[in-house]
Structures are given as structure tokens and as C-alpha cells.
Amino acid sequence: LQQLDGDLGLDVDVSGTFGHPVLSGAGDMTVNVARFTNATLPALRGFNVRCTFRDNALTLDRFAGDLAGGPFNMSGRVTFAKLTEPILDLQMRAQSVLVARNDTLTARADGDVRITGPLAAATVSGNVALTNTRFLKNIDLIPIGLPGRPAPQPPAERPEFFSLPSPPFRDWKFDVTIKTKDPVLIRGNLATGEATTDLKLIGTGLQPGLQGVVQMQNVEATLPFSRLNVSRGSLTFNPSDSTNPTIDLQGTSVIRDYTVRVYVYGTLLSPQAIFTSEPPLPQEEIISLIATGATRRELSTGNVLAGRAAMLLVQQLYRKIVKKGEPTDSNTVFNRLDLDLGTVDPRTGQQQATVRFKLTDQLVLTGDVGVHGDFRGKLKYLIRFR
């Protein structure tokens, strides 16, 4: 704790035996504010507790507070059939409480959760609905975009799902449904979209697990020289390996005169991808086309490679200076403009510079400038067969 301000008062009388305790009295607690040294944990404000002890039970008359603007409350009772074996019957409700906050994720949730059973083996059941949740991830263009750069390495440590190995929580059982009240917003400098969840938290405190599906909707990834529209995307969670869901993702990208289809499958930690194109190209050429906007044969010309690197640098500077902090826009001038330096004119066999500007999905304006300054402009109307 970094800061704690409040009051506590307790007046309880315990009589009888361990097997048949008799309780009487009351307790009050007020926490005006509680702040934690971990900045990702929300501050607790306006926390008030009023409880009464009667016979063999503790009853919560008032248990409410506020977590980062989200109110919560708990009601119910704890029965002491034996003083060492309390039995829980508690109901907790929350409205838009902050449950996660870091550089990547901000998550709020509504909750209606019940805790019942003996303290050593209680059952947690109910519903949680995600609301006002945002996932933000900015990706640096240059390291992933420049031809010849090595592929990014996976994290050295495998992520672990949470576990509660200490008693009494280790034997608690979970049956909590997790859905989205509002779609989770996916934002970043290279991607936008939404996600909905249909998950269940099951298992025990020692070995909890997630089961269900996360569906992605309206996801659009803006790559340096292309745009990928995800028509279908899902993550399927298995409780035996909750941090490594199965991927099923299908997307389409139109790059110059090519229609590229991407299918990603496998698991999150070991994904596999299949690429196809129309007109047909080998997979290596398709990958090069997606990443750089040019085939490997075209990149063999030094001027083309330099032109691609220059376009990447200009795009990155534009996003960092002009569009700093704003989500990606798939309809910017840079995403519709394509510049090739050092390409070969099929009519003359000489090098030329080519500029393509996408007016609409069907209309493309192109211009070629030869080494002698001659210019040729064209307006293309594209017809794609499905």
C-alpha cells in the first residue's frame, strides 16, 4: 500500500464451543482512499463495511465501494457451523469496475458473482460482462518492414495463466461466464477492429482454465504497402492450455493487380500461414508482395529497394509527427499511393519510375517516367472475378 486513510471499529463477543460457537456484536470499517504502489492497480475510494454478528453467523449489512469510478457491493452471510469451518454465501455485484490497466490493455467489467460453500472448497459462479475495454498496440514499421531484416523472435518466456496454489483458494471451483457487453475495441497505428468474447472460467484455484471463443469483427490491418481485411477471425481457448489458443483467421488484401488471400491457423505460440493469390504466385513471392509491395524479382533492383525503404521512412515519420496518438486510417494518401523506382519498361527495356494512386477500389491512376523524361499516364478500371 502507498496510501491508506480510514477508520476501523470492532466489538465482538465469542462464547460457546468450537463446535457450537455463539457470536454477538458488530463491526464498522471506512476507507476514504487506498492507493497501491503498483500503478496498474485501481485506487479504492468510499469503501464502507457494516457487519453484525449474531448466533453463529456474520451478516454483511453494508459492503460497498468504488474502484476507479466503478461502484461495487457485496451482500450475504458467513455461517460458522464450526468456528474453524465457515460456510460462505456471498453475492457480489459490480458496474464498470476497472479490472485491468497497463500500457496495452484497459478493461472494465460488470459483474454478478456468487461465492457459496465451505471456505476450504467454495464455488465461484456467475457472469462477467466486459465493457468500455480497449486494446492498444503500436508497432514500429521499420523493424518489421525493411527487406532483409530478420523475423521478430517469439517471447523468451511462455506466458502463464493465473493460479492460486495456497489454501483455502487452491480448492475453490470456478464456473464464471465471461462475455462482452460492448465489443472490445482493438486500436493501434497499424490495425483497428473489434472483438467479442464467449468464454467460461472453469477449473479450480490451483488449475483454472478458459474455455470458449473470442471472435474478431471488422478487423483491418494496415501494412506498409497493403491493407489486409480480416473476413473471419477467432481464438478458441482450451482449459488445458489457456495461454495458447487456437487461431482461425482468414483475410484478403488487394496489392496492385494481385488479390492475396491469407489463412492463419495453428496456435498463438506456433502459428502457421498459407498464402494464395490471383494471378497465382509462389508463396515466397506473395509474402514479399505483402511486406514490401513488390516481388522478390522486382526487389533485386537496388533502386526499387531504396524506394521501398524511403516510403517506409516517410510513412513512419508521418504517423509519428502528423498523426501521433491517433488510430490508423486505412484511407490515407500514403495507403493509396505506391511508388516504384528502377522498374523496367516492358516496351523499351529501360528503367523507369512508376507512381500508382488508388482512386477507388476499381479505378487506379498510374504514371510512368522514363530515363529520358518521357511520361505516360494511364487510368485503369479493374474488374475482379470472384
Image (spheres, helix red, strand yellow):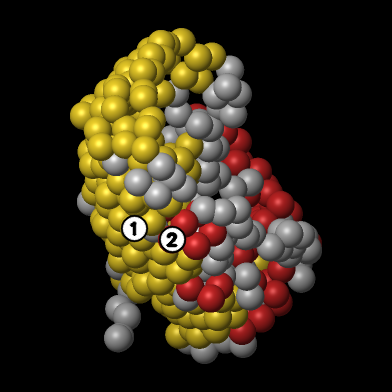
* Residue at the outermost front position: 16
Q: Position of residue 184 (x, y in %)?
A: 34, 51
Instruction: Give the x, y percent position of residue 204.
Output: 48, 65
Percent across and percent down for residue 337 are 48, 53
On the rendered image, what quadrant is the N terminus found in? top right
In the picture, the quarter occupied by the C terminus is bottom left
Q: Are the residues at dot 1 and dot 2 in contact (C-beta closer than 8 Å)?
A: yes
- As rendered, which of 136 and 377 lies closer to the eye? 136
Residue 94 visible in the shown view: no
Could you tell me which residue is drawn at 32 percent across and 80 percent down?
384
> Pointer 1: residues within 10 angstroms few (<14), some, or many (20+)?
some
Task: Please name the residue shown 48% across and 73% down the image.
Answer: 239
Compared to 302, does 129 lie above or below? Answer: above
Residue at (69% x, 63% y) in the render: 158
The residue where tag 2 is placed is 121
Determine the secondary structure under disc 2.
helix
Tell me which amino acid carries mark 1. Answer: Gly
Q: Nearer the viewer, residue 228 or 366?
A: 228
Residue depicted at 38% across the width and 14% down the height? 9
Is 264 on the left-hand or right-hand side of 218?
Answer: right
Q: Which residue is mark 1?
A: 117
